């Protein structure tokens, strides 16, 4: 057997069926979308076996886009889990044949809740299609498995259908990246959008700064104590005047001729008008600012909108938080 050739046949089989379904899509999909958009309750998805597994994935996708969805196992539903159903819900049943006993047994109990029911099947004129309010047929040409045994093309069709449903709904509901991030606070997109400088900066007792009348010696002690690789220089009102980095300090120490020079005022050797950021800026924007330079900035002072120093932010801490510049 040519292994690669057999694998490619599976791709070709499933792609062919997906194209066939695309060309035969009808307006029942629109009815389904409208039902969900006008829904006061939640979307309940159910199905047995492999169709049920696909249903669980679709539930995950719907929830990630802000549409409250849950998966209801047909057998568990008949043993108490029907308690999650309310009259404002909408039920979607996935079943290849539309003849699965456990799924059909659900219809009569669900009707007592007066919910609308849609079915997604892969054949016309099934028992399930006759019992539901909206039936969408995904006409598969053949399963990709030998002898048509294992659900393959049929589950792929259901999965793509679920993706199409979720994406269309998200566009109608105008799910922006900012809204999406609210549902994914620890995902890469969530971190990029939601993480602000304030959450990552060193502040309060961990902040690193000296007053303008401080000496170079004071700056060295503060830099050693806080370990941030820099100190900010501020006036008595904490307004930022400059910065002294460990690189600045090394260059200074390489030039001094006497230990007494450590008593010089720090303002005499600081970098004036340093690059700074605001505490309410997005961390990803600051990351780009720090990285997209001929020589990356490793630490930057942070001020509030009143231009008072509130912290120091290291490039290391942004990357450590899982925020990356793409």
Image (cartoon, helix red, strand yellow):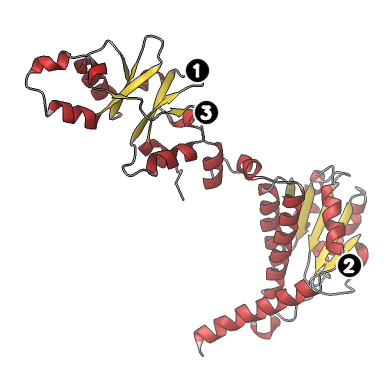
- How crowded is the residue under tag 1: few (<14 C-alpha within 10 Å), some, or many (20+)? few
Residue 236 picture location, percent across and down: 37, 9
Q: Earlier in the sequence, mark 3 or mark 1?
A: 3
Residue 129: x, y in percent?
A: 89, 67
Question: Which comes before the other along the chain, label 2 or label 3?
Answer: 2
* Residue to which mark 2 is pinned: 129
Q: Is residue 250 left or right of residue 282?
A: left
**Which disc number belongs to residue 280?**
3
Instruction: Identify the element where label 1 is drawn.
Output: loop
Q: Is residue 182 above or below residue 112?
A: above
Q: Which residue is depicted at the point 70% across and 65% down?
A: 160
What mark, if any, has residue 306 been given in the picture? Answer: 1
- Which residue is found at the position 91% from the left and 59% from the top? 133
Query: Which mark is first along the chain, 1 or 2?
Result: 2
Q: Distance between the Cα atoms at labels 3 and 1?
A: 12 Å
Give the percent coordinates (x, y) of residue 135: 87, 65
């Amino acid at each position: 057997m040519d292994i690669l050739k057999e694998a490619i046949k599976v791709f070709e089989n499933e792609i062919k069926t997906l194209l066939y379904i695309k060309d035969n899509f009808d307006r029942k999909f629109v009815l389904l979308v409208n039902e969900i958009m006008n829904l006061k309750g939640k979307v309940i998805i159910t199905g047995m076996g492999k169709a049920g597994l696909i249903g669980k994935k679709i539930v995950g996708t719907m929830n990630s886009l802000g549409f409250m969805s849950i998966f209801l196992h047909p057998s568990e539903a008949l043993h108490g889990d029907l308690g999650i159903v309310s009259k404002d819900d909408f039920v979607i049943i996935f079943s290849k044949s539309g003849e699965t006993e456990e799924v059909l047994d659900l219809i009569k109990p669900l009707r007592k809740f007066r919910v609308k029911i849609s079915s997604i099947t892969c054949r016309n004129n099934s028992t399930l299609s006759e019992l539901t309010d909206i039936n969408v047929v995904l006409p598969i040409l053949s399963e990709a498995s030998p002898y048509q045994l294992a659900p393959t093309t049929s589950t792929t069709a259901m999965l793509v259908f679920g993706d199409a449903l979720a994406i269309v709904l998200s566009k109608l509901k105008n799910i922006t990246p900012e809204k999406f991030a609210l549902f994914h606070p620890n995902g890469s997109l969530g971190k990029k959008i939601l993480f602000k400088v304030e959450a990552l900066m060193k502040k309060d007792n961990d902040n690193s700064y000296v007053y303008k009348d401080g000496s170079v010696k004071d700056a060295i002690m503060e830099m050693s104590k806080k370990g941030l690789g820099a100190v900010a220089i501020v006036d008595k009102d904490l307004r930022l005047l400059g910065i002294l980095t460990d690189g600045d300090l090394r260059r200074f120490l390489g030039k001094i001729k006497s230990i007494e020079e450590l008593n010089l005022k720090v303002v005499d050797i600081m970098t004036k008008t340093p690059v700074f950021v605001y505490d309410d800026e997005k961390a990803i924007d600051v990351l780009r600012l720090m990285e997209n330079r001929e020589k990356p900035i490793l630490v930057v002072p942070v001020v509030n909108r009143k231009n008072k120093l509130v912290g120091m932010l290291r490039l290391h801490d942004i990357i450590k938080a899982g925020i990356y510049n793409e």
